Structures are given as C-alpha cells and as structure tokens.
C-alpha cells in the first residue's frame, strides 16, 4: 500500500512535468501554479482513498470530486459555500468560463495572457489527465499506457504554436514519464523481497544491475534522439535548419513557416495580432501615391456553412511580367500607375502585402506566385518575414455613375457561380429583401446594404458583443455591435444573398506617415473589409466599419463615410479621388489608438449553426455519468431475469399404445420430467445464489460442495430462519443432484427459494451493502474486472509472442548463419 501511495504521487509529479510544453503558449506561469494545486488535491484524495481501501471506481469518483473542489477554490464565482463547496450556480459559472474560452481561443495569438477562461480550461485539462494517469499507473498497474494522456497535453502546443515547440519542455515531460516507469518497476521488484547482488555481500544495499543501467542509458539516448532528430531532419521542423540556412525551406503549413495558404485561419491570425497589448511594427511601405488605399495581403472568398474560408490560390511566378489592367480600361474609370517598396518586419504568413493591382514585382524569388483572381502574392515554400521587394501597381478610381452602368453577370459566369454562394439564413434573406427591394442597379443594391451599417441604424463599434442563442451573423445583425471582421463578413454575406459576387479582404489601413511617403504599419493597422465584383470594373472595395474606430481609415467617393456629418453627394459623372474619412462628431479629438481594438471575427464567422439547447451544457455530462453508473445494475437485472426460469422442470408428455389388459381403451399417457432442463435450472439457480452472496459480501468458497455451502449459510448467515434455511438447503440439494446424480431433482420451485434467501440476506445486511448490491453489484464488477484482466493478459501475451517470433525470424546471427550455409 505504501508503494502504491508513492507511485500515485510520482504519477502526479509526472503529469505536471508532462504539462511543461504548455509554457510555450502562456506568457506567465500562473497556469502551472493553479494546475499544481489541482493535481496535488487529486493525488491527495487518491492516496486517502487507497489508505481506506476504497475500490477503484470509488477512487475515480473521489478524484473527480477533489478536482471539482480545487476548481471551485481556484475559480470562484461568488456563490460557493465555505469558499470551496460548489453550488449549482458554480456549475453555471464554469459553463460561462468554458464558453468564454472559445472566444479567447479565437481572439488571442500565442503567447496568450492569463485570462480566467483559458486558465480554467488548462487546469481542467491537466487535472483530468492527472486522474487518467493515476488510474492507469496505480489502479490498473499499466504505467506504459499513461504516456498516451501525457502525449495529449504535448499535442496542444504542437497544434496551436506558430513556430516549432521548444525542445526543453518535451525533454522535461519525457523525463517525468521515464520516472513513472522506473518507480513502477522498482515497486514490482521490491515485492519479491530484498535484492541479492549475487556476491553474498551487502544484500540490503541497493545496487544497479547491468541490465538496469543499460535501460537507463537507452532511455537517455532515446529522449536525446527524440529531441534532436526533428531538429535535424528536413520537413520535421524549421528550428535548426532555419538557423543554418537563410534560403527557402520546405513548408510546414503554419504561418511563418511557409506551407499551404489555404490552411491559414486569417480571422484567427488577425484577431491574435489585434489583441496584443503591445504595439508592434509589422510592415514599412513607401509609395509615391499621395493618398493610397489599403495595403492588402489575402482574401477569404469561399463561404461555407461554418463561415468564410481561404481557397488555395493558384498563379504564375511573381517575378515575371504580370497582366496590365490599364490595357483595357473600363468606361468611367481613372487609372494611374504608381510604385511602392515594402519591407516586412514581423508578419509571419505565406502571403506578401501589396496594393490591389500590381503589374511588375522585383526582388522576389521564384518561390513567390501571384494569383490574378484573388490579387494576392503567396508561396507554398516560404514566408513573409524579413522580405524586401518593390512593385509597380495601378490605382483605379471609380465614379458612382460608372458603377451604376455595370450589368449583372451571366448565370453561367464562373465568378457569378462561385462568389455568390451563401448558406440560407432566413433573417439574412429577409433583411436583404427589404434593403434592395426598390433598387434597380447592382451598385444601388450594394449601396443600400453598405449604408445600412451606420450609426443612424443603431450600429456601433465595440470590443465586446452581446451573446445570443443563434449564429454569429444573426447576433451581429440583431445586436448591431461588433468589430471590423464582423462588419466585413456581414456585408459580404448580405451582398452575396442579393446575388452579387463579394468576398472579404485582409490587409492594413494607412499608418503613420513620415517624410517621403513612407508609412509604418503596426498591428493596430490590421483590418478587414469587403470587396464587390462589378462586370467591367473588377473587385471594388467597400469598408463598412465605422471610420472613427479604425486607425488610418480611408473612404472613397463610391463608398463614403455614412456617419460623417453633412455628407455631400458627388455630382453625376464626377470622379472624385478618395481621401481620408471625415471625422464624425466627437471623433475629432479622439485618439484611435485608445479606441477598442478589433479582437477579430472567428474563422467560422457568420456560419449558421443550430440554436443552442435550453439545458445547460453539463446536463449531458451528468446524464452520461448516470447512464454509465447504471450499467452494472442493468446487467445484474438482465442476468437475474435470464436465470429466473429456475422453477420446476417442465414435464415431457409421451404416449404408448394400449395394452391387452384394457381392451377398447385409448393410448396410455406418461408424464416425465425433462432431466436436461432440470439440471440446467439447478445450475442457473445455484449461480444466482453465489452472485447474491457476493453482492451481500458473504464468503464464497468455490472448493466446497453445495451441501457444505448450504450448511455453512444456515449455521453462520441465516440465523435459524426456517423458511430461508429450507430454501438454501433446497438449492444446495438441487445443485448436488444436478452435479452428481443420474436423475436431477424435479418438481421443486427454485425461484421462490432464491427470493427467500435473497430477502433474508438483505434484511441482515447494513444499508451501504444493500445500496451497493442494488446500484453497483460487486458480482458484476468482479466479473468485468476478471474479464478485463484476462483480455489484457492475453493481448500482452500475443504481443510478446509476436515480438519474440519476429526477433527469432529476423535475428542477425540467424540470417548470417543461413547465408553462410547457402
């Protein structure tokens, strides 16, 4: 028992060591302190339960209760009893933390700050892993399997970390796992007594055997290889190779390490940067355009039920000559050529920022491609960090009358078919129908939708939004409070619902302007807006986010600031150049850096989802737990019902012909008992009696004869009850006849006898024993435990046999001997 307690504390320590990779996600170490408190409580409860010899299922329930108490104390909701006893309101508080953690995961990029929702999820996960590790290592004595939940912790930073996960935390977790295996092996060896070294001296001194020393050396070498191999093999990591080679590397699919652009969650990446507490310089751009528009780097144009997604771009090498849009200018469009130079500082993506229509790009390798349809620079093998390049581009300026003359695309047009697809949302369809019902041209329909996102219609900019029970786009259109991603996605969705191609663009607004037309763009300038396609004009930008809330916002003549005071509509045919947005009242003295920063619209923004259930989230977990706890009782009831046929054996009716002594009489009917059925009924009744004894904690000796068992029960357990004494003797006699006699006992009712014995045992048992016999019958649990042990042993034997056969078959000595013999 002492060895099990020490193994339990080692399992808890190994769990904390395995959680070391989480340090790559959090900015501080608050999570480790809180996780250590929760794991300590779980380990203490487990040790106390083993000291009291509580069964394994009781230990699991105790550890779960201990974790709940720890979470209540660490994350109080203000309604607890004695500061650590949870109430129903506490469970609701935990549900709110779980829901808020989803939003925080979308909003923050690594490394994340210490928010209560993220800390709650982390402590809950580490505590749950500690319970699983304790059950596997101590309860089931399968410490090797405990590596699986430990590996689950390590998979979290691997999945979300932008760069390669540091190797040191992995080595710490591996050391904890090896410590757990070593402690278990030492405990197993000590069960055989004192260790003898083989020389007859100092037998009480612990000395490492050559085999154990070799095992430790192999473990150290294995951990070292697991850490060093991913750093040295191309494709597994970019840590070591990137430090030695500054050229283009292979992609990993993560931002900042090349990979497929379609795997980047632009919404989550943008949200994480916008929510950083510090301002970071990301891009420096120099252009000779007096008032440039937004610098863009990517688009999301694949609208699915779960929101806008990024399509895999396709294009030609960017260092070649690109198509010149000024070759065929559209009517009513003014186009001028400019030149820009870009220096990327802290942007890690497989995209490069540029203005909308580049025609020539310099200083880029052949790894960078240009998609003319999406108008993006991308790479599958490189990233944007540290890139310096220059390009010529065309700036197009549109007039309202020119856009009004644009005709709808044909139904078979690829852009029409692809860029107008949108899931059916009734609230969106009704709103779009109302906004465009009196509009005749595409531009007027788009303007009707664009003008709807204004202060006079109740829309405002805010870092936080109100919750709801429907999907996010419906919440936004109902609450009318949001940030740039919500405005961009909502407008693109509504324009698509009107049958007009639209998509969401990502980039930077204009930053601080220094001399020479140089703009320094920071994470505060990250932005998202909508682009609408007009036949003959291409993709035209519309920014529906309130101008006062966006640092460096720019408005155009065809999409003016709807919140500006005294808006002046340009005359027909005018082509006023876009300029800075007019400040709204009260915004003149407002510093945009002090406004609420965008914390992003998730990658599933606007995706229609089913309405949340009315029941709390934890109701399903409670029902599942109750169903799991009811399984033993249901199994016991089914087994008892199957054995309930232990009544008198059914008779077998046979007929014989009439003899001569009874002339004229009919055939003679002979009624006989079915011996096979009587024997089976007796065995079933006896098995039911033994299970009943196990359920009520009465000693069962499998070596006794049925008669000896019945006499012992009458003497020691039943206490002279005449009816129960006769019943148990009847069951013993029936089993004895069924085993040894040629003819079994027939004509006796065995089922009432079982009921009498069960009732007498129940009346003499205490309340806890009766409750356990009804809810968690020990006979069922014992049978399941034995079956699981047999299956596990059989699996281990099969694996060992297969490994032995493979070792013999592919033994190097044997192969060399066979080769020499040939």
Image: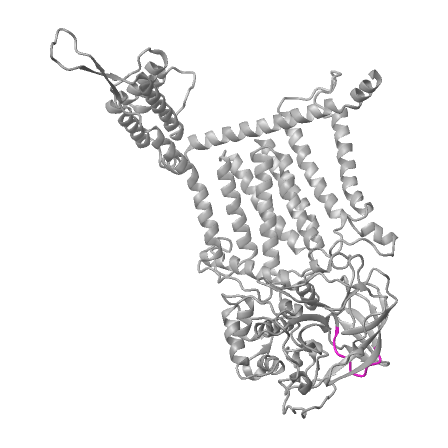
Left or right side of 723 for 627: right
Looking at the image, which is closer to me, 242 or 408? 408
Q: Does the magenta-highlighted stretch encompass residue 653?
A: no
Q: Which of 143 and 496 is in front in this view?
A: 496
Magenta segment boundaries in residue numbering: 287-295
Please tell me which residue lies in front, 593 or 511: 511
Instruction: Specify the quadrant of the image occupied by residue 773.
Output: top left
Q: Can residue 208 be seen in this view?
A: no
Q: x, y percentage for residue 145? A: 62, 37
Residue 288 belongs to the span the image colors magenta: yes
Q: Residue 564 falls in which quadrant of the image?
A: bottom right
On screen, residue 579 above or below 62:
below
- Residue at left 65%, top 24%? 801
In the image, residue 60 lies at what x, y percent?
Answer: 52, 41
User: Which of the 4 quarters of the picture holds residue 108?
Assistant: bottom right
Position of residue 590 in the picture relative to residue 124 (left or right)? right
Whether 304 is drawn above or below 40: the answer is below
- Image quarter in which the C terminus is found: top right
Q: Quarter of the image for the N terminus: give it.
A: top right
């Amino acid at each position: 028992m002492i060895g099990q307690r020490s193994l339990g504390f080692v399992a808890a320590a190994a769990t904390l060591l395995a959680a070391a990779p989480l340090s790559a996600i959090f900015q501080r170490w608050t999570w480790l302190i809180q996780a250590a408190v929760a794991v300590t409580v779980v380990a203490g409860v487990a040790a106390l339960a083993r000291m009291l010899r509580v069964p394994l299922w009781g230990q699991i329930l105790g550890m779960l209760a201990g974790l709940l108490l720890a979470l209540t104390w660490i994350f109080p909701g203000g309604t607890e009893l004695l500061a650590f006893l949870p109430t129903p309101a506490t469970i609701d508080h935990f549900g709110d933390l779980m829901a808020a953690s989803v939003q925080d995961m979308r909003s923050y990029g690594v490394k994340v700050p210490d928010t209560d929702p993220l800390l709650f999820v982390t402590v809950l996960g580490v505590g749950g892993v500690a319970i699983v590790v304790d059950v596997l290592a101590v309860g089931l004595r399968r410490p090797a399997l405990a590596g699986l939940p430990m590996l689950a912790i390590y998979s979290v930073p691997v999945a979300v970390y932008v760069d390669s996960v540091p190797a040191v935390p992995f080595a710490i977790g591996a050391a904890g796992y090896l410590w757990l295996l070593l402690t278990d092996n030492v405990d197993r060896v000590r069960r055989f007594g004192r260790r003898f070294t083989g020389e007859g001296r100092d037998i009480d001194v612990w000395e490492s055997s050559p085999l154990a020393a070799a095992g430790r050396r192999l473990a150290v070498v294995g951990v070292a290889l697991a850490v060093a191999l991913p750093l040295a093999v191309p494709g597994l990591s970019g840590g070591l190779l990137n430090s030695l080679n500054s050229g283009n590397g292979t992609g990993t699919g993560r931002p900042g390490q090349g990979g497929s652009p379609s795997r980047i969650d632009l919404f989550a990446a943008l949200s994480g940067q916008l929510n950083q507490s510090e301002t970071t310089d990301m891009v420096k751009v120099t252009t000779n355009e007096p008032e440039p528009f937004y610098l863009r780097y990517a688009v999301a144009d694949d609208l699915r039920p779960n929101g806008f997604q990024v399509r895999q771009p396709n294009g030609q090498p960017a260092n070649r000559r690109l198509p010149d849009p000024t070759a065929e200018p559209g009517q009513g469009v003014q186009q001028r050529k400019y030149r820009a130079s870009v220096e990327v500082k802290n942007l890690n993506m497989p995209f490069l920022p540029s203005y909308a229509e580049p025609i020539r790009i310099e200083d880029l390798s052949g790894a960078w491609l240009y998609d003319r349809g999406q108008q993006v620079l991308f790479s599958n093998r490189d990233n944007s960090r540290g890139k310096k390049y220059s390009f010529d581009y065309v700036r197009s300026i549109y007039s309202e009358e020119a856009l009004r003359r644009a005709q709808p695309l044909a139904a078979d047009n690829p852009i029409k078919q692809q860029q107008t697809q949108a899931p059916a949302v009734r609230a969106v369809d009704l709103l779009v129908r109302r906004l465009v019902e009196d509009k005749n041209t595409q531009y007027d329909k788009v303007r009707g939708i664009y003008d709807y996102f204004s202060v006079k219609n109740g829309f405002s900019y805010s870092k936080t939004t109100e919750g709801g029970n429907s999907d996010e786009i419906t919440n936004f259109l109902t609450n009318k409070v949001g940030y740039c991603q919500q405005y961009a996605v909502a407008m693109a969705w509504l324009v698509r619902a009107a049958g007009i191609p639209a998509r969401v663009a990502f980039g930077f607004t204009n930053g601080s302007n220094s001399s020479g037309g140089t703009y320094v763009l920071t994470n505060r300038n990250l932005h998202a807006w909508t682009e609408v396609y007009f036949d003959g004009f291409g993709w035209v930008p519309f920014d529906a986010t309130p101008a006062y809330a966006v640092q460096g916002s720019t408005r155009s003549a065809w999409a003016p600031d709807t919140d500006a005071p005294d808006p002046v509509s340009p005359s027909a045919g005018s082509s006023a150049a876009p300029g800075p947005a007019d400040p709204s009242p009260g915004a003149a003295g407002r510093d945009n850096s002090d406004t609420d920063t965008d914390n992003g619209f998730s990658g599933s923004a606007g995706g229609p989802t089913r309405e949340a259930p009315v029941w709390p989230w934890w109701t399903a977990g409670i029902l599942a737990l109750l169903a799991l706890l009811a399984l033993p009782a249901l199994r016991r009831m089914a087994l008892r019902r199957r054995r309930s046929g232990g009544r008198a054996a059914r008779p077998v009716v046979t007929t014989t012909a009439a003899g001569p002594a009874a002339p004229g009489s009919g055939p003679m009917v002979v009624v006989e008992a079915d011996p096979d059925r009587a024997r089976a009924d007796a065995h079933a009744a006896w098995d039911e009696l033994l299970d009943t004894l196990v359920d009520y904690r009465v000693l069962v000796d499998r070596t006794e004869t049925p008669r000896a068992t019945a006499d012992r029960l009458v003497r020691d357990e039943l206490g002279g009850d005449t009816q129960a004494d006769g019943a148990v003797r009847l069951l013993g006699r029936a089993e004895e006849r069924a085993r040894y006699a040629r003819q079994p006992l027939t004509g006796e009712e065995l089922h009432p006898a079982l009921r009498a014995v069960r009732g007498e045992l129940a009346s003499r048992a205490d309340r806890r024993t009766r409750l356990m016999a009804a809810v968690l019958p020990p006979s069922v649990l014992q049978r399941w435990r034995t079956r699981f042990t047999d299956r596990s042993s059989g699996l281990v034997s099969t694996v060992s046999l297969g490994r032995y056969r493979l070792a013999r078959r592919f033994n190097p000595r044997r192969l060399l001997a066979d080769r020499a013999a040939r």
